[in-house]
Amino acid sequence: MTLDISREQARRFLALYHFTPTNVAGTMERLATVQYDPLNPVGRNSDLVFQARVPGYQVDDWQKAAYSDRLIYDAWDKQACLVPVSDWPMRALIREKYRPYHDREILQAEAEIASGILETIDARGPLSSLEFEDRQRVGADHSWYGQTRVKRIMRSLWASGLLVTHHRKNGRHYYERPERVIPVQHYQGTPLLDVEEYLRWIITRRQQAMGLLPRSAEAAIWCSCGTGAENKVALSQLMEAGVLTLLRVGEKAVPYYMLTSTLDLLDAPLPAPRMLFLGPLDSMLWDRK
């Protein structure tokens, strides 16, 4: 199905889809992923995302859902993100195949140290990189992986699913084995290993995060979504199945996808006007074109 809508309708839809007030759990159910960034000029991105959608939200409120209630966990998605813990079996191919290529290089080069880190955590429980004596610096100052060898290895083990974030202190990860963190019903869930099915699933997740997904979305949005040819096939399959609807927006008929289940929002009344501050990595702003 293809629909023609105005730019004004598209703006109204995005306002309703993203900013109809809800709670932390409701935000995760709606978006399915919230990008995490440790930089904190006026608030970390995750807090800004929730603050724009959750009335009365306070800094770090999401951590209870993540580290006490275990409804959310830290995972590699578009980048480092918070995702529903029920996604664990669905993300098996990300941990195996679609994680950053640097992780394979790091773990191959430092296999003995990586094994020692896992053995130490097995024996002692959740640890950060600070609990290890090895302080050798190897990374560039701007490296997301960290500047020490141990931190880089732990981040690589995290991306591969051999470690997960147990909790944080002042933003610092304390890592633990996944079987001791992920609720058993999800940890032992049947992993999604069929590539075509996985691609349809992850592209649907991207659609959830953005609300409107442009056909020409920048490359970073397709991270973990396979090749261009593969996601083109997956999008066609999702259209055929009725999961996605193609929109032509404005006089130029710019093509966007939306979840068919959200079509009713095109004609829904707007919420009361209010001022919101959006983080630069809010998923509504992922596509900057």
Image (cartoon, rainbow, N blue to C red):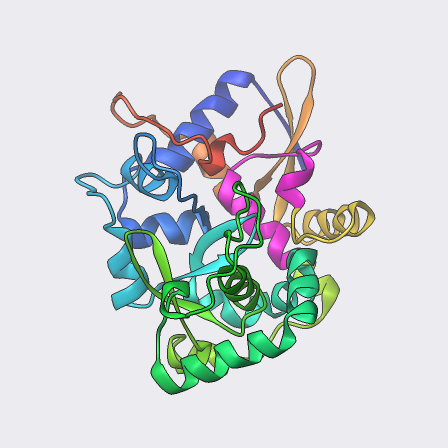
Nearer-the-camera pick, 42 or 92: 42
Q: From the top left corner, tell me how far across and down residue 186 is, in percent.
A: 45, 76
Q: Is residue 136 above or below residue 132?
A: above
- In the depicted structure, whether residue 273 falls above or below residue 201: above
Say whether residue 193 is magenta. no
Residue at horizontal 27 percent and vertical 21 percent from the top: 275
Task: Give the left or right position of residue 62, taking residue 245 as reference.
Answer: left
Q: Residue at x 69, y 15 (%)?
A: 252
Q: Residue furthest left?
A: 56
Considering the whole magenta stretch, tell me its main secondary structure. helix
Residue extending farthest top: 251
Q: Is residue 186 above or below residue 8?
A: below
Q: Nearer the viewer, residue 269 or 231?
A: 231
Q: Nearer the viewer, residue 43 or 238?
A: 43
**Residue at image x 53%, y 74%?**
162
Q: Is residue 149 left or right of residue 244?
A: left
Quadrant of the snapshot with the C terminus:
top right
- Please name whichever residue, 93 or 212, is drawn nearer the observer in this view of the structure: 93
Name the image quarter holding the N terminus: top right
Q: Position of residue 264 (x, y in %)?
A: 46, 37
Q: Position of residue 220 (x, y in %)?
A: 64, 40
Give the side of residue 88 with respect to residue 221, left or right.
left
Q: Residue at x 67, y 57 (%)?
A: 102
Quarter-wise, where is residue 133 in the image?
A: bottom left
User: Residue 220: within the magenta?
Assistant: yes
Q: Which residues are magenta?
A: 200-222
Residue 61, position in %: x, y? 23, 50
